[in-house]
Image (tube, rainbow, N blue to C red):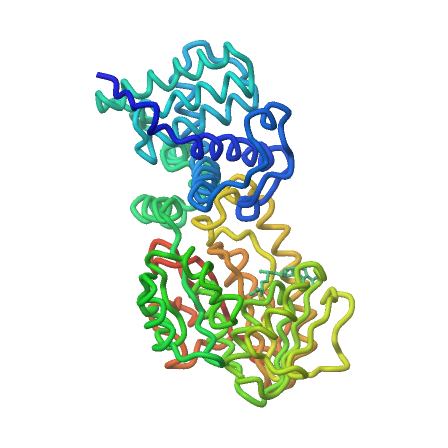
Amino acid sequence: MQRIAPKATRSTGENRARLAAVQQLMRIDEEGAYVGLVGGSPTRTQPHARKRDPQAPLDSRDARFVTELVFGVTRWRRRLDWLISQLRPTGGTLDPELLQILRLGIFELLELGKPDWAINSHVDLAKELVRPEAGRLVNGVLRNLTRMRTANAIPRPKLEQGFSQRQQADVFGIASSHPSWLVERWLQRFGEADTLKLLASNNRRPVYSLRVNTMKVDIGALEQELQESGVEVERSPYLSGEYLRVKSGLQDVLAQGLLSDGLCQVQDESAGMVVSLLDPQPGERVLDACAAPGGKALFAAARMRGEGQLMAMDANARRLRGLPATAAQQGVPAGFLTIGAADLRESLPEQHAPFDKVLLDVPCSGLGVLAKRADLRWRRQPADILSNAQLQDALLDAAARLVRPGGLLVYSTCSIEPEENDLRVDAFISRHPDFVAEPAPTGLLPDSVLNQNGFMATFPHVHGIDGAFGARIRHRQ
Ligand SMILES: C[S@@+](CC[C@H](N)C(=O)[O-])C[C@H]1O[C@@H](n2cnc3c(N)ncnc32)[C@H](O)[C@@H]1O
């Protein structure tokens, strides 16, 4: 029997959140907006939306619901579209807004376990945003789904007898909502069992960690303060003296102003491990050559205790804009950190060179961070890996000129693809016989994050954090 909610329990806040989510999803599809950045109010207001959505901002609970919807629908898009194709007898092209509403409805019913009566909100949204008859279609598709849900008979893609690897990639790709080319690539490399684990990790709620700013606060004191205010944290198993994993209450960390007070920053432990691999010491001259927005540079500053010289440069001046203020909040001494916008390939900071250590955290496919960047899996194409490799090689060649003899270059990515990682290091060494790749020295990082070459290589399904890579490359004396 259908569950009917009393009218009073139907939340108008949730309805407004659904409208905002549809608007944001349209922006992501039409304008390529980045799913991590569209959490605020939509910039484009629909004519229908104005009628329904007065200017009052959403409260924080509804705003969080918008984020959950946008993130979830983006992540599950392929599976949702496949389900729509199974649930719509007529087929044919859908209005873009109608498609988003159907995706939203299916996501809420299947992933968030919303009750059957929530469908009324999607039906109303379709009537208002698209046209009155669109409500009938939404009602038909979503009621069909709830009947299947009750009968435990949600459609699933199936493998045929004698399937090829491409067909397997299609089926896994639909079920886990990843593109087939990526699944096929991982099947070839990791085999079936590990690919399934990786796909599942990419669909899990991401793990967020805080890098404790040890220049301002002791980790034990911050841990206690957070726990007393109801934020559940635990020490990172990889960087136990500097990182706290947030189990629940990240919003409270933000609300308490701990970030703006400079006591901590949200940063994945894999990013912290790259800085550990660099091992910047007080008194050294260090360059972060692709620094923006500056997370790793700020950790390096804390490790150096503001002594020596740290230069943070990046080709993108806009992405560097917030760094001086954040550095000041975190207590980084003026004069210790120099910030400059420059394309490393064209204008080397030679007047400051040579450096004891250079960190080169290059632009990459980001295929290690799919749990956090829900849209990336749809944006990336196989050709991107090749074009990234060309830029990565050029940046490595430029950075090499800035390392003093005997000094260290650390190359890092947030990718798990060999073409962007070990293979770039191999190619660099063959172009530069005056450099040698060296395994991470004992004690710098846990053995569990080192690969067969002694490079740092984390994987979401193995380490439970972002996938990332870091290699130490030494300039021979
Ligand atoms: C992965 S991000 C760096 C993240 C940063 N290390 C952090 O931890 O916050 C890569 C950066 O490389 C920069 N970049 C791309 N091409 C560059 C170039 N030719 N010269 C210098 N920086 C470049 C991009 O603007 C981007 O900010």
> Considering only vertical position in the picture, is 66 above or below 321?
above
Q: Which corner quadrant holds the N terminus?
A: top left
Q: Residue at x 59, y 36 (%)?
A: 55
Q: Hey, which residue is sitting farthest bottom in the picture?
A: 283
Q: Between 19 and 364, which is closer to the camera in this rendering?
A: 19
| Residue 36 drawn at (x, y percent) | 53, 48
| Residue 379 drawn at (x, y percent) | 56, 41
| Residue 476 drawn at (x, y percent) | 59, 84
Q: Between 306 and 82, which is closer to the camera in this rendering?
A: 306
Q: Which corner quadrant holds the C terminus?
A: bottom right
| Location of residue 84 (image quadrant) | top left
- Number of marks in the rendered image: 0
> Considering only vertical position in the picture, is 477 above or below 110?
below
- Left or right: 273, with 410 as reference point: left
- Left or right: 285, with 277 as reference point: right
Q: Residue at x 50, y 9 (%)?
A: 133
Q: Between 446 and 41, which is closer to the camera in this rendering?
A: 41
Q: Quadrant of ligand 1?
A: bottom right
Q: Is residue 424 visible?
A: yes
Q: Residue at x 41, y 75 (%)?
A: 242
> Considering only vertical position in the picture, is 72 above or below 350?
above
| Location of residue 56 (image quadrant) | top right
- Left or right: 66, with 309 as reference point: left
Q: Is residue 184 visible?
A: no
Q: Residue at x 69, y 73 (%)?
A: 339
| Location of residue 247 (image quadrant) | bottom left
| Residue 37 drawn at (x, y percent) | 57, 48
